[in-house]
Amino acid sequence: MTPQAQNRAIPRPTRYCRVLLGLAALGAVAVCLAALPPLVHAETGIENADEAWLRYPALDAQTAKTYDRLPPRVVLLGDSLLLKSAEQELMRGVAGMLGRTIEGEVSQGKMSLLSANSIVLGTLEKVRPLEAGLSPPEELRADGFWLKSARIHGFVCLVVSGATERGVLYGVFALLRKISLTENIAALDEVQQPYAPIRWVNQWDNLDGSIERGYGGRSIFFADGKVRNDLTRVSQYGRLLASVGINGCTVNNVNAQARVLEPSFIAELSRIADAFRPWGVQVSLSVDLGSPKLIGGLDTFDPLDPRVAAWWRNRVDEIYRQIPDFDGFVVKADSEGRLGPSTYGRTHAEAANVIARALKPHGGLIFYRAFVYNHHLDWRDLTNDRAKAAYDNFQPLDGAFDDNAIVQIKNGPIDFQVREPVSPLFAGLRRTNQAIELQITQEYTGQQRQLCFLVPMWKEVLDFDMHIESGETLVRNLVAGRVFHRPTGGFVGVSNVGLDANWLGSPLAMANLYGFGRLAWNPTLSAETIVDEWTRLSFGSDRAVVQTISALQLHSWSVYESYTGPLGAGTLTNILGNHYDPGPESSERNGWGQWHRADPSGIGMDRTIATGTGFIGQYPARVQKLYETLANCPDNLLLFFHHVPYTHVLHSGKTVIQHIYDSHYEGAEEAQNFVVRWRSLEGHIDESRYRDILARFEYQAQEAVLWRDTICRWIYELSHIRDAKGRVAETNR
Ligand code: GCV
């Protein structure tokens, strides 16, 4: 059965359930319950997949006892939707993990309600007057929160406070995470602040219910051209997003249909906003720059035409009448066939600003994507280079964008390949807001049918030092607006969850969604910390489970890279079709510009300043030095920057061709090993997830062999250089 079919199968009772049923018949339930390992019976399987990392399974009795002093009552300082979500989540989490009921009270500012030990939920403005000196150790920024153990009127209290109500909700999720991870919460005085104001996900959902590059089923938002009637999944998604601090969601494909701006559609969109609102997730739309002409009845969409400006103002005003907390727009223009300002000889800044000015009075934002390139490049011209496009198009416009416009930049200069250098545009914009776009949905990295935990890749990008002038200028600080003191900026993840019970299609792929959120909140967290948290929240704390799953996840990107695109050549996939199967020749001899330039004499794109396309010249001087010479260029990006003979010797001491053979064989072997390692967990986790994931690993093991044999055969036929270990010629000729 394919993993997809497996997903659709009706979940079987877990092994634990079946064991229980059998034992009940024997009348021996109590005896045998005690004999079961506690973590097995605490865990539920695929039937709870929609809860992802928010399952709140019961802690074992001894651990639960350490939380006995948690106040049995919650006092809510206000009655907003957000505070109610916070309260309900707290009750749900405590009931699940500690088996205790928390009583709720709403205070309309009457302190008399604080007449017992309580967990107090409220904004700082409401919390401060409760007791003299009750103040966080540092000022809270928007969405930041403070967890404080305090005596109020002599009662033992745990205060969860935020600058905003959304901060209070985030504080509750953080508190529950601490309990899930069995941390000590006896004497808390902890402030957490988001690294950047922008922490959004983009969904590439189409109105017909399909999702571009979505691998987790149909859209949770749309079906048959309309917003779905049942938005239960949207609300569940909002809960997941809020739990990791995501505050915005763009609900439709960047290849947008103009009609999303029609008044009838806006009314429907407001239902999605309603479903997200209790979780503090604000809605935004991808829009077509041609809308004033396509649906607006104008004969132009020229951004400098006053009629066009008026059209955008009216349309935006209409949206805010129906959705007062609407967040803004995302625009993909002059890219892959989309309309754009080039039609009228206008700049991207002029296009962005006409919309920014319509949004400004309402506090809305426009994200203008830097993914602009010509996909009809002449492949015969060796000076052409798609990688240069974003910088060439946007760097000259630095400073020309309004303050509520943000340039949204993909992490690398091509398109979410298994490995790319960071986009030089992060260093090129100093007077413009920017956000990094990361891809949670695994388009080029296994489509959730193969394991590829992307947090280690994202960490490399975010921790990369651009060395602008003399100081340290890490990408994470550039995008957060911290280096050049921009008013806004941050992190956007293309998530593409769907109706599939597992959201992304695979239970293990959910670590990427969790990891994106955690990094957007705090990019200084390590990949190890993130995966450890996620595994324990999703699968419990059995040591074998945590160690095995964490190790598999942490290793998976390098394994996937080793058999799909080593040495920075790009993912050697079918770029004209599914972006999944091996298809190295599809990159060449066409205008898409994902060239690896493999020919009988060598492989790689010469992007040097000295002899190549000059792309390296877009980086600051110290980064140029890193990439320009063969002596300095790291092996893992060699073929991105240099065209070399197959016999070129790497820093590792191997030739390029031997590295390619070896990495494919090693990668395929590692993928077989994933199956073995996963099998070691049988009985340690619920059976439904165990079986589901096993089927996925078995499938991946076969795919890795297919990749290995296809790429090794291809490169051997091109180079005519034999594998020193005799595998390729023997296996494939
Ligand atoms: C939504 C790549 C993907 C496209 C995607 C595009 C983009 O080219 O293959 O499906 O379009 O990126 O990011 O706009």
Image (cartoon, rainbow, N blue to C red):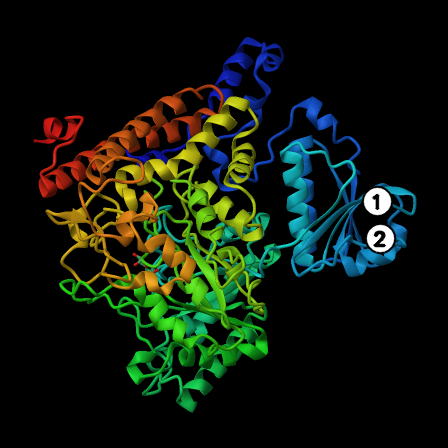
Q: Is residue 419 found left or right of 149 in the rendered image?
A: left
Count the labels in the image. 2
Q: Disc 1 on helix, strand or loop?
A: strand
Q: Specify the quadrant that holds the N terminus.
A: top left
Q: In the drawing, what numbered circle is on residue 134?
A: 2
Three-letter amino acid code at the position of disc 2: Leu
Question: What is the crowding at mark 1: few (fewer than 14 residues within 10 Å), some, or many (at least 20)?
Answer: some
Residue at the disc numbered 1: 150
Percent x, y for residue 307? Answer: 41, 90
Q: In the drawing, what numbered circle is on residue 727?
A: none
Say if 587 sits above or below 35 in the image. below
Say if 729 sits above or below 160 in the image. above
Percent x, y for residue 413? Answer: 34, 59
Say if 732 sits above or below 328 in the image. above
Percent x, y for residue 442? Answer: 36, 47
Disc 2 vs disc 1: Cβ atoms closer than 8 Å?
A: yes
Q: Specify the quadrant that holds the C terminus.
A: top left
Three-letter amino acid code at the position of disc 1: Ala
Q: Is residue 670 found left or right of 248 in the rendered image?
A: left
Q: Disc 2 on helix, strand or loop?
A: loop
Q: Nearer the viewer, residue 14 or 288?
A: 288
Question: What is the crowding at mark 2: few (fewer than 14 residues within 10 Å), some, or many (at least 20)?
Answer: some
N-terminal-most mark, 2 or 1: 2
